[in-house]
Amino acid sequence: MTVDIRHYTAEDLDQIRETILDIHVEVRHRDFGLTGPFYDRDRFDERLAAYASRPGWTAVLGYDGDEPAGFCFGTTLASDTKWWDSMLEPQPVELTREDGHRTVALNEIVVRKEWRGRSIAWQLHEAWLGPRTEERVTLLVNPAAGSGAVQARYEAWGYRSVGAQQPFPDSPRFTTMLRLVTLK
Protein backbone atom coordinates (compact mmCIF):
# COMPACT_ATOMS: atom_id res chain seq x y z
CA MET A 1 0.00 0.00 0.00
CA THR A 2 1.19 3.50 -0.74
CA VAL A 3 -0.04 6.75 0.70
CA ASP A 4 -0.17 10.23 -0.77
CA ILE A 5 2.77 12.05 0.82
CA ARG A 6 2.49 15.78 1.39
CA HIS A 7 5.50 17.91 2.36
CA TYR A 8 5.37 20.85 4.77
CA THR A 9 7.67 23.48 6.25
CA ALA A 10 7.39 25.52 9.44
CA GLU A 11 5.32 28.10 7.58
CA ASP A 12 2.64 25.41 7.12
CA LEU A 13 2.46 24.32 10.76
CA ASP A 14 -0.82 26.09 11.51
CA GLN A 15 -2.62 24.08 8.81
CA ILE A 16 -1.30 20.68 9.99
CA ARG A 17 -0.92 21.21 13.76
CA GLU A 18 -4.33 19.79 14.79
CA THR A 19 -3.88 16.72 12.57
CA ILE A 20 -0.48 16.01 14.10
CA LEU A 21 -1.77 16.54 17.64
CA ASP A 22 -4.83 14.35 17.06
CA ILE A 23 -2.69 11.51 15.66
CA HIS A 24 -0.25 11.88 18.56
CA VAL A 25 -3.06 11.51 21.12
CA GLU A 26 -4.69 8.63 19.24
CA VAL A 27 -1.49 6.62 18.89
CA ARG A 28 0.50 7.51 22.00
CA HIS A 29 -2.40 7.56 24.46
CA ARG A 30 -5.00 5.15 23.09
CA ASP A 31 -2.90 2.61 21.19
CA PHE A 32 0.24 2.54 23.33
CA GLY A 33 -1.10 3.71 26.69
CA LEU A 34 1.62 6.33 27.08
CA THR A 35 0.30 8.78 29.63
CA GLY A 36 1.70 11.24 32.08
CA PRO A 37 2.86 14.82 31.67
CA PHE A 38 5.55 14.09 29.07
CA TYR A 39 2.98 12.61 26.65
CA ASP A 40 0.18 15.14 27.25
CA ARG A 41 -1.18 16.88 24.18
CA ASP A 42 -0.13 20.33 25.42
CA ARG A 43 3.44 19.22 26.22
CA PHE A 44 3.71 17.56 22.82
CA ASP A 45 2.40 20.76 21.22
CA GLU A 46 5.10 22.74 23.06
CA ARG A 47 7.79 20.42 21.70
CA LEU A 48 6.26 20.57 18.21
CA ALA A 49 6.31 24.39 18.30
CA ALA A 50 9.89 24.42 19.59
CA TYR A 51 11.08 22.03 16.87
CA ALA A 52 9.24 23.95 14.14
CA SER A 53 10.81 27.22 15.30
CA ARG A 54 14.28 25.95 14.37
CA PRO A 55 15.80 26.43 10.92
CA GLY A 56 15.39 23.42 8.66
CA TRP A 57 12.20 21.98 10.17
CA THR A 58 10.13 19.94 7.72
CA ALA A 59 7.29 17.47 8.00
CA VAL A 60 5.47 14.96 5.86
CA LEU A 61 1.97 13.61 6.29
CA GLY A 62 0.72 10.52 4.53
CA TYR A 63 -2.89 10.34 3.38
CA ASP A 64 -5.04 7.43 2.32
CA GLY A 65 -7.72 9.34 0.45
CA ASP A 66 -8.81 12.03 2.88
CA GLU A 67 -7.65 10.12 5.96
CA PRO A 68 -4.27 10.98 7.49
CA ALA A 69 -2.37 7.74 8.03
CA GLY A 70 0.63 9.20 9.84
CA PHE A 71 3.33 11.83 9.96
CA CYS A 72 6.98 12.45 10.58
CA PHE A 73 8.96 15.58 11.18
CA GLY A 74 12.38 16.80 12.20
CA THR A 75 14.89 19.57 12.04
CA THR A 76 18.52 20.29 11.32
CA LEU A 77 20.81 20.28 14.36
CA ALA A 78 22.30 23.76 14.76
CA SER A 79 25.95 24.33 15.60
CA ASP A 80 24.88 25.21 19.16
CA THR A 81 22.41 22.31 19.51
CA LYS A 82 21.71 20.77 22.89
CA TRP A 83 20.82 17.43 21.24
CA TRP A 84 23.93 15.65 22.47
CA ASP A 85 24.04 17.32 25.93
CA SER A 86 21.71 14.81 27.58
CA MET A 87 23.75 11.75 26.60
CA LEU A 88 24.18 9.54 29.66
CA GLU A 89 27.78 8.67 28.74
CA PRO A 90 30.36 11.07 27.29
CA GLN A 91 30.65 10.85 23.51
CA PRO A 92 33.63 11.61 21.26
CA VAL A 93 33.63 15.13 19.84
CA GLU A 94 33.75 13.63 16.31
CA LEU A 95 30.26 12.26 16.97
CA THR A 96 28.71 15.31 18.63
CA ARG A 97 30.24 18.13 16.57
CA GLU A 98 27.56 19.99 14.67
CA ASP A 99 27.82 22.84 12.17
CA GLY A 100 24.19 23.46 11.29
CA HIS A 101 24.42 21.32 8.14
CA ARG A 102 25.79 17.94 9.26
CA THR A 103 22.87 16.23 11.02
CA VAL A 104 19.09 16.20 10.90
CA ALA A 105 17.09 14.95 13.87
CA LEU A 106 13.99 12.87 13.18
CA ASN A 107 11.89 14.12 16.07
CA GLU A 108 8.74 12.06 15.49
CA ILE A 109 7.36 9.38 13.24
CA VAL A 110 3.86 8.12 14.02
CA VAL A 111 1.51 5.86 12.05
CA ARG A 112 -2.11 5.22 12.97
CA LYS A 113 -3.08 1.64 13.85
CA GLU A 114 -5.14 0.96 10.70
CA TRP A 115 -2.07 1.68 8.51
CA ARG A 116 0.61 -0.11 10.53
CA GLY A 117 2.32 -3.15 9.04
CA ARG A 118 1.99 -1.76 5.51
CA SER A 119 5.37 0.01 5.16
CA ILE A 120 3.76 3.41 5.74
CA ALA A 121 6.38 4.39 8.33
CA TRP A 122 9.11 3.58 5.81
CA GLN A 123 7.35 5.62 3.11
CA LEU A 124 7.00 8.60 5.46
CA HIS A 125 10.61 8.28 6.60
CA GLU A 126 12.04 8.11 3.10
CA ALA A 127 9.78 10.87 1.73
CA TRP A 128 10.82 13.15 4.59
CA LEU A 129 14.50 12.25 4.35
CA GLY A 130 14.68 12.36 0.52
CA PRO A 131 15.02 16.14 0.07
CA ARG A 132 17.27 16.59 3.11
CA THR A 133 20.84 17.75 2.46
CA GLU A 134 22.42 16.67 5.76
CA GLU A 135 24.92 13.81 5.73
CA ARG A 136 23.38 11.91 8.65
CA VAL A 137 20.14 11.52 10.59
CA THR A 138 19.66 10.87 14.29
CA LEU A 139 16.64 9.88 16.37
CA LEU A 140 15.65 8.81 19.85
CA VAL A 141 13.70 5.62 20.48
CA ASN A 142 12.31 4.19 23.67
CA PRO A 143 14.03 0.79 23.81
CA ALA A 144 10.93 -0.71 25.47
CA ALA A 145 8.59 0.41 22.67
CA GLY A 146 6.94 -2.62 21.15
CA SER A 147 9.09 -4.82 23.38
CA GLY A 148 12.12 -3.69 21.36
CA ALA A 149 10.46 -4.07 17.95
CA VAL A 150 10.55 -0.33 17.20
CA GLN A 151 14.28 -0.11 17.78
CA ALA A 152 14.79 -3.27 15.72
CA ARG A 153 12.88 -1.63 12.87
CA TYR A 154 15.22 1.37 12.94
CA GLU A 155 18.20 -0.97 12.95
CA ALA A 156 16.77 -2.69 9.86
CA TRP A 157 16.60 0.78 8.25
CA GLY A 158 20.34 1.24 8.82
CA TYR A 159 20.40 3.09 12.16
CA ARG A 160 22.85 2.10 14.87
CA SER A 161 22.82 2.85 18.58
CA VAL A 162 25.37 5.42 19.75
CA GLY A 163 24.32 5.55 23.40
CA ALA A 164 21.41 6.69 25.52
CA GLN A 165 19.98 9.96 26.72
CA GLN A 166 17.21 11.46 28.80
CA PRO A 167 16.44 14.85 27.23
CA PHE A 168 13.76 15.91 29.75
CA PRO A 169 13.53 15.14 33.48
CA ASP A 170 10.15 13.43 32.98
CA SER A 171 10.95 11.69 29.69
CA PRO A 172 11.94 8.06 29.31
CA ARG A 173 15.55 7.14 28.75
CA PHE A 174 15.93 6.81 25.01
CA THR A 175 18.38 4.96 22.82
CA THR A 176 20.12 7.50 20.57
CA MET A 177 20.47 6.19 17.03
CA LEU A 178 22.38 7.48 14.00
CA ARG A 179 22.42 6.69 10.29
CA LEU A 180 24.08 8.10 7.22
CA VAL A 181 21.51 9.75 4.97
CA THR A 182 23.01 8.09 1.91
CA LEU A 183 21.74 4.69 3.15
CA LYS A 184 18.44 5.04 1.34
Image (cartoon, helix red, strand yellow):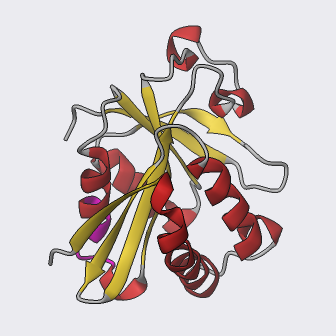
Residue 113 found in image quarter = bottom left
What's the magenta region? 116-122
For the image, the number of numbered tags is: 0
In the figure, 166 relative to 78: above or below? below
In the foreground, 170 or 5: 5
Rendering coords of residue 130 (x, y %): 23, 45
Q: Is residue 172 magenta?
A: no
Looking at this view, name the residue that lies furthest to the left. Answer: 1
Q: Is residue 85 left or right of residue 22?
A: right
Q: Residue at x 27, y 60 (%)?
A: 122
Check if residue 120 falls in the magenta segment: yes
12 up-or-down from 183: above or below:
below
Q: Quadrant of residue 171?
A: bottom right
**In this rendering, does residue 158 appear at all?**
yes
Name the quarter where the C terminus is drawn: top left
Residue at the (37%, 40%) spot, across then down = 159
**Relative vertical location of residue 175 with respect to residue 112 in this rendering, above or below:** above
Q: Residue furthest front?
A: 11
Residue 70 drawn at (x, y percent): 39, 74
The structure residue drawn at horizontal position 44% and vertical position 36%, both measured from the top left corner, is 104
Toward the top, the furthest residue is 93
| Residue 183: % across, % down | 22, 35
The residue lying toward the viewer, choosing from 110 and 161, is: 110
Residue nearest the observer in this picture, 152 or 12: 12
Q: Quadrant of the N terminus?
A: bottom left
Q: Is residue 177 left or right of residue 129?
A: right
Q: In the rendered image of this protein, does residue 121 appear above or below residue 174? A: below
- Image check: 45 left or right of 66? right
Q: Is residue 108 visible?
A: no
Question: Residue 25: x and y, percent?
Answer: 61, 81
Q: From the viewer's perspective, tell me whether residue 28 is left or right of residue 119.
A: right
